[in-house]
Image (cartoon, rainbow, N blue to C red):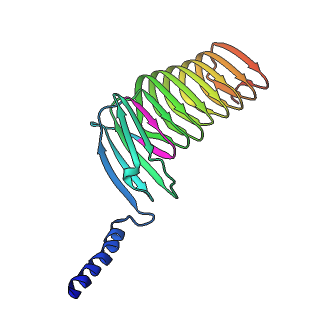
Amino acid sequence: MRQIMISALCLLMAFPIVAQEDEPAVGEVIVETRQLAPFETLRVARGINVTLVEGEKPKAEVHIMNADPEDVLIEQSNKDLTIRMRTRIYRNMAVNVYLYYQNIKEISAGTGGSVYSDDVIEAKRLVLDAGTDASIQFEIEVDHLEVSASAGRVEVMGTANTIDVNLSTGGRFNGANLETKKAKVRANTGAGAEVWVTEELEARAASGARIEYTGDPQKIEVRTSLGGRVQEME
C-alpha cells in the first residue's frame, strides 16, 4: 500500500511539469494554418494585422505571440469573413494573419486593426472602411472605390475610374498616388484627404477638415464651412 501511495504521489507531481512543457514560451511565435471557404467581404477586429495574399485557395495562416492560437476566431457566414480575438485580457499579444484570397469586394478594419497587401487588388467595385486607429494600405485597380474612415487611415495607390470618400473625426485618406477620373470627397471634424483627379472633383470640407487635390481637374465644385479648406497641392 505504501508503495502504491508513493507511486500515485509521483504521478500527480509529474502532471504540472508536462503542462508547463506544453505551454509556449514568452515571446514564442506560434503558426497555425486554417482552410477556409471562399469569401468576398473581410472584417478585421481590434488589434489584428492582416496581410492579403492572392492565392489559388482561401486559407488563413495565423502567427501569434503571447496568446493561444485558439483565441483567434475566424468566422464565416456565406461570403463574409470575420477575424477577431476571443474576449479576454491580453498582455503583449501580437497577431499577424496571412489571408489568402481569390476575389475581394469589401474590407473593414476595426479599432486598431490593419490590412495590407503586396499584391494589386483588382475589383469592379471595392469598399474600404477604417475605424479608430485602424489602417488600410495597398495598391488597387478598380472601376469604383468607396472609402469611409473615422479616426482611421486609408492609403491606396494605382487606378480607379471613380472614387467616393467620406471622412470624419480625424479620418485620413491618402490617394495622392491613386489616379482617378472623377472624385467625390466629403471631410468633417479635422479629417484630411489627398486626391489625384483628372476630370471632375466634388469636394466638401467642414469643421476644420482639409481636402487637397492634384491632377488639374477640368471641373471643380467646392463647398466649405466652419474652417474647412479645399486647396490644390503645392
Quadrant assignment, res 16: bottom left
- Horizontally, residue 213 falls left or right of residue 159, namely right
Kindly identify the residue that appears in the image at 35 percent across and 54 percent down. Answer: 31
Quadrant assignment, res 40: top left
- Depth order, front residue of 81/182: 81
Within the magenta stretch, is there residue 179?
no
Quadrant assignment, res 165: top right
Q: Is residue 157 above or below residue 98?
A: above
- Horizontally, residue 131 falls left or right of residue 204, namely left
Q: Is residue 166 above or below residue 100?
A: above
Locate residue 49, reporting x and y percent. 47, 45
Residue farthest to the right?
227
- Depth order, front residue of 25/13: 13
Locate residue 4, reporting x and y percent. 21, 83
Residue farthest to the bottom?
2
Tally of numbered tags: 0
- Report the predominant secondary structure element of the magenta stretch: strand
Within the magenta stretch, is there residue 47?
yes
Kindly identify the residue that appears in the image at 64 percent across and 25 percent down. Answer: 214
- Depth order, front residue of 107/8: 8
- Quadrant in which the N terminus appears: bottom left
Give the magenta part as a residue range: 40-51
- Depth order, front residue of 205/95: 95
Locate residue 118, reporting x and y percent. 43, 40
Residue farthest to the front?
1
- Quadrant in which the C terminus appears: top right
